Image (cartoon, rainbow, N blue to C red):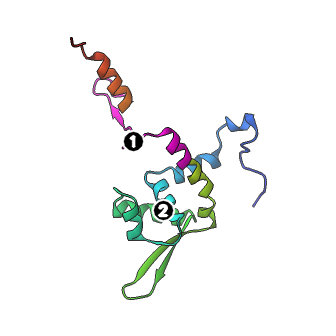
Amino acid sequence: MNDEPVCPASDPEQITAFCPAYHRAVEVIGRRWTGAILRVLLSGEIRFSDITAAVPGLSDRLLSDRLKELEAEGIVTRTVIPATPVRIEYRLTEKGRALHEVVAAVSTWAETWQPAGPPATAVTSLDSGSATDDAARRESSALAQPATR
């Protein structure tokens, strides 16, 4: 492994340029539910059912898909424990544990900047077919309401 960064973040000219390695990393860890799954896995070895219990709204199928993706990326290992009943446990690899600071930074950012509750979602405008977010739609709707006296 080369010690020189693929896309050095310390170089102001490079930080604005497209960086394939950065883009790939964001694509891997930025998938829906992956951040929440990684956050739970940072606590140590854990069973599938414990992950679903820790992340409300996460379906078994989606968790299974994300764990397979993370395993294929070398971020998670899956261990089958031959007992009765068979137990399967998941844990972060060294590569996965290296995401600790990233997850902690996102958690800190979220505590500071994100309101509690469900995230804003994109809504497609029936008029134009373009995507708008909930906040813009609410603001637009409020502006369109006639003033009441």
The magenta stretch is 107-133
Residue placed at 32% from the left, 17% from the top? Answer: 143
In this view, the residue in front, 37 or 25, is: 37
**How far across and down, in percent of the image, does residue 68 sit?**
46, 65
Residue placed at 64% from the left, 39% from the top? Answer: 18
Residue at mark 2 to residue at mark 1: CA–CA distance: 20 Å
Q: Residue 55's quadrant in the figure?
A: bottom left
Q: Residue 98's quadrant in the figure?
A: bottom right
Task: Find numbered disc 1 in the image and state the secondary structure of the residue it sits on.
Answer: loop
Q: Amino acid at mark 2?
A: Val
Q: Is residue 125 left or right of residue 38?
A: left
Quick check: marks 2 and 1 in contact, CB under 8 Å?
no
Q: Is residue 127 magenta?
A: yes
Task: Find numbered disc 2 in the image and state the secondary structure of the residue it sits on.
Answer: helix
Up-down: is 138 above or below 33? above
For marks 2 and 1 on the same chain, the one whose residue lies earlier in the sequence: 2
Q: Is residue 140 magenta?
A: no
**How far across and down, in percent of the image, does residue 84 sit?**
37, 88
Q: Which image quarter is the C terminus in?
A: top left
Q: Amino acid at mark 1?
A: Pro
The residue beneath circle 1 is 119
The residue beneath circle 2 is 40
